Image: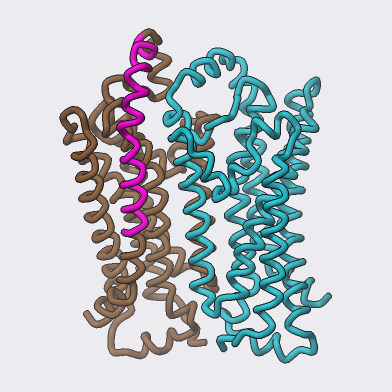
Chain colours: A brown, B cyan
């Protein structure tokens, strides 16, 4: 487990920084919930007059949207944006490190199989993701408990939290496979930002596009908050898509990494 | 001149990839206008106006009047600005730092050109890339707008938005360029640029959700030129001056620090 321990230690500080950033976001935004809740009292009758179909198409669920948890789902999109960037950066950074720094010969001449190296590195990635997720869930839960005005919907909260973790895994897998596939991976931040922000903007554009098929290609749509609120479950086809991409990336990375020709310099 | 061509060439592939992305975004977005407007934009716009600010903000639509074609395009402009910022930061933090990162700094520095000249040529190349980004967006937008709505081509509105896009991109470019010139560690400078981008984006979201947060505007380049103002054919003079001054300072500071600092070889 030397590789795991080493890689784990290397990224501790960066994980702490990410956690700090997430704390700021959750605290600052949730702090404004009471203000929002006040506005809502005035808005509620307005919404109740609108036809059900329209509300559905706008993604408004009157019972849930105006709760603290409903407000939390607003921020959740941005939290997921940030945790996704962290996840893909971890994947790209930890697995692609040797190639990037031109020191593949150092680690590959150690008496370990390549499979072992890749697995330990992936585990280090997932360990950091896990820590970030647990921390995020705790502060989110704490903050919800502080600001909430009615009972918390446990199932919905669990589903939202887990969806963040699933997205983190997906992006980590994507990062790992990109790191293995690209021969000259140069800038971790550059690749991470372009991939995640492209998918993120694709998700925002869905407000105009409204193409059903495009949802399968944009991960931020896979765990649709409105759907979760209405049905208290994930959409199965989207979950299948998630499994396909995540498992596909990891298996692909394994297959390629164990046989590819790696240049020493 | 050799260096300039070399820089452009090294970003050619990236640029092509981005151009395809822009064309897709603009084409898919504007192409949806008919479906969007026939669905009774007036109604939707009226409803959106009555919705809580936070709710509109999650679509990234805060303060955008989508009841006119110009406003509709403003939405696409807002999405493109996010991608533009990512692009500008990627280029700005990469173009100088990549020599040290890829261990080609010695190769470049022993050439008979001064560091100052290297810096300026690289800045010029980066600005060219930003210009290409804006030109492609402008060109595609005009072409598609002409086919979708020939009687109302919103030429001037688009022109103002494209100028705003260019200014915002140059702002992010020069700032990340400065950080790459100033900081020794390429990894740190690109991470710092990412932090700047994420922080400003999140503050923009916060401004969308919470009232009376205009004092934050100076920290959020995405809010410097608001779509409503651009549709009135005006560029906010204060922020226009501000961006120009900050960009010039960033360039001057880069030119001051880069020729003297130690290179990490």
> Is B149 colored magenta in this rendering?
no
Q: In the figure, B110 relative to B39: above or below?
A: below
Residue drawn where x is 81% and y is 77% of the image: B2
Bounds of the magenta segment: A19-48
Residue B178 x, y percent position in the rendering: 63, 69
Q: Main secondary structure of the magenta part?
A: helix
| Image-based side of B15 in relation to A91, left or right | right
Residue drawn where x is 28% and y is 70% of the image: A124
> Is A41 colored magenta in this rendering?
yes
| Residue B58 can be seen, yes or no | no
Residue A142 x, y percent position in the rendering: 20, 45
**Image quarter (top left, top right, bottom left or bottom right) of the C terminus of chain B:** bottom right
Q: In the figure, A73 relative to B181: above or below?
A: above
Quadrant of the rendered image containing residue A230: top left
Residue drawn where x is 53% and y is 32% of the image: B61
Q: In the figure, A115 relative to B197: above or below?
A: below
Quadrant of the rendered image containing residue A35: top left
| Image-based side of B203 in relation to B173, left or right | left
Question: How many numbered discs?
Answer: 0
Residue B253 x, y percent position in the rendering: 67, 72
Name the residue at the right extreme.
B1
């Amino acid at each position: 487990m030397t590789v795991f321990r080493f890689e784990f230690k290397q990224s501790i500080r960066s994980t702490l920084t990410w956690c700090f950033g997430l704390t700021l976001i959750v605290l600052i935004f949730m702090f404004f919930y009471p203000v929002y809740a006040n506005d809502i009292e005035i808005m509620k009758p307005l919404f109740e007059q609108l036809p059900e179909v329209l509300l559905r198409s706008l993604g408004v669920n009157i019972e849930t949207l105006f709760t603290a948890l409903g407000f939390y789902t607003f921020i959740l999109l941005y939290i997921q944006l940030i945790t996704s960037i962290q996840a893909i950066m971890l994947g790209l950074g930890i697995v692609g490190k040797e190639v990037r720094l031109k020191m593949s010969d150092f680690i590959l001449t150690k008496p370990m199989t390549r499979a072992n190296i890749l697995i330990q590195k992936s585990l280090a990635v997932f360990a950091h993701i896990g820590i970030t997720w647990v921390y995020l869930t705790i502060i989110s839960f704490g903050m919800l408990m502080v600001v909430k005005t009615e009972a918390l919907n446990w199932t919905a909260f669990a589903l939202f939290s887990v969806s963040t973790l699933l997205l983190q895994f997906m992006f980590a897998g994507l990062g790992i496979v990109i790191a293995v596939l690209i021969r000259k991976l140069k800038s971790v931040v550059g690749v991470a930002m372009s991939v995640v922000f492209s998918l993120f903007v694709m998700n925002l554009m869905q407000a105009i596009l409204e193409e059903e098929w495009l949802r399968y290609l944009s991960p931020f749509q896979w765990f649709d908050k409105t759907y979760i609120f209405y049905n208290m479950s994930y959409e199965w086809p989207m979950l299948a898509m998630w499994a396909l991409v995540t498992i596909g990336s990891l298996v692909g990375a394994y297959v390629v990494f164990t046989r590819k020709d790696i240049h020493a310099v | 001149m050799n260096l300039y061509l070399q820089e452009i060439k090294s970003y050619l592939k990236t640029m092509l990839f981005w151009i395809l992305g822009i064309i897709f975004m603009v084409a898919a977005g504007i192409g949806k206008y008919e479906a969007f407007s026939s669905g009774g934009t007036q109604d939707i716009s009226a409803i959106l106006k009555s919705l809580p600010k936070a709710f509109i903000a999650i679509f990234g639509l805060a303060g955008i009047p989508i009841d006119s074609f110009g406003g509709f395009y403003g939405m696409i402009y807002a999405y493109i600005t996010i991608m533009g910022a990512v692009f500008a930061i990627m280029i700005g933090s990469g173009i100088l730092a990549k020599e040290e990162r890829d261990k080609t700094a010695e190769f470049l520095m022993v050439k008979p050109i001064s560091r100052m000249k290297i810096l300026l040529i690289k800045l010029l190349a980066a600005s060219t890339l930003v210009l290409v980004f804006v030109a492609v967006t402008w060109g595609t937008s005009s072409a598609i707008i002409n086919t979708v709505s020939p009687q109302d081509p919103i030429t001037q509105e688009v022109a103002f938005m494209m100028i705003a896009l260019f200014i915002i991109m140059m702002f992010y470019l020069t700032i990340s360029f400065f950080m790459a010139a100033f900081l020794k560690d390429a990894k740190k400078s690109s991470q710092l640029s990412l932090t700047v981008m994420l922080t400003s984006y999140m503050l923009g979201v916060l401004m969308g959700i919470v009232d009376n947060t205009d004092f934050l505007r100076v920290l959020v380049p995405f809010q410097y030129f608001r779509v409503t103002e651009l549709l009135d054919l005006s560029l906010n003079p204060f922020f226009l001056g501000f961006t120009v001054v900050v960009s010039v300072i960033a360039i001057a500071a880069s030119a001051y620090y880069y020729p003297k600092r130690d290179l990490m070889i």
